[in-house]
Amino acid sequence: MNLLIRWGKFNLVGAAGVVLQLALLAVFNRLTPGHYLVATVAAIEITLLHNFAWHVRFTWCDRRDGSAFLPRLLRFHLSNGLVSLVGNLALMRMLVGHVHLQVLAANLIAIVCCSIVNFVLSDLWAFARVRPRWA
C-alpha cells in the first residue's frame, strides 16, 4: 500500500479516535473533578484499543499475514501506548497545570503532537510485515 494512502487511513482512524478520546475525557473529567491526569489515562487506554481494532481492519489490513493478535496488540501498546501516555501526560501537565489551558484544548494539542511518532512506530514495528522464516 502506498505510504500516503496509509498515512491518510491512519489519520482517518486517528480522527475518530480523537473524537472518542475527547468525549471520554470530558465524561471522566466531569466524574473525577480535579483529577484530569487520571481521566486522561482512562480516555487514552480506551482510545488505544479502539484505534488498534481499526488499524488492524483498515489501516494495516494488507499486513494480516499470520501475525498473532496478542503480540501485535502488545507491540501497539508498547509503542503507541507509551508515546500517547507519556506524551499526553507530560503535555497535559504543562498545558493545563502551568499554561492553564482548558483540558480538552490541551488534550487536542497533545494528541496532534504524538501522532507522527505513533504512525512511524506503527508502520515500522507494531504492524510491521512478518518476514517468512526459512527452515
Image (cartoon, rainbow, N blue to C red):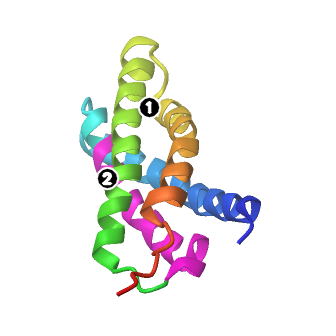
Q: Residue 120: x, y in percent?
A: 55, 50
Per the image, is 52 magenta?
A: yes
Range of residues picked out in magenta: 40-64
Specify the quadrant that holds the N terminus.
Answer: bottom right
Q: Is residue 46 visible?
A: no
Q: Is residue 99 above or below residue 119?
A: above
| Label 1: element kind | helix
What residue is at 51 percent from the left and 39 percent from the top? 114
Corner quadrant of residue 38: top left
Q: Is residue 45 above or below residue 49?
A: above
Residue type beneath disc 2: Leu
Q: Earlier in the sequence, mark 1 or mark 2?
A: 2
Crowd around label 1: few <14 · some 14–19 · many ≥20 (10 Å) = many
Residue with the mark numbered 2: 78
Q: Residue 33: x, y in percent?
A: 26, 34
Q: Nearer the viewer, residue 128 or 117?
A: 128
Residue 103's disc is 1
Q: Residue 66: x, y in percent?
A: 42, 86
What residue is at 66 percent from the left and 65 percent from the top? 9
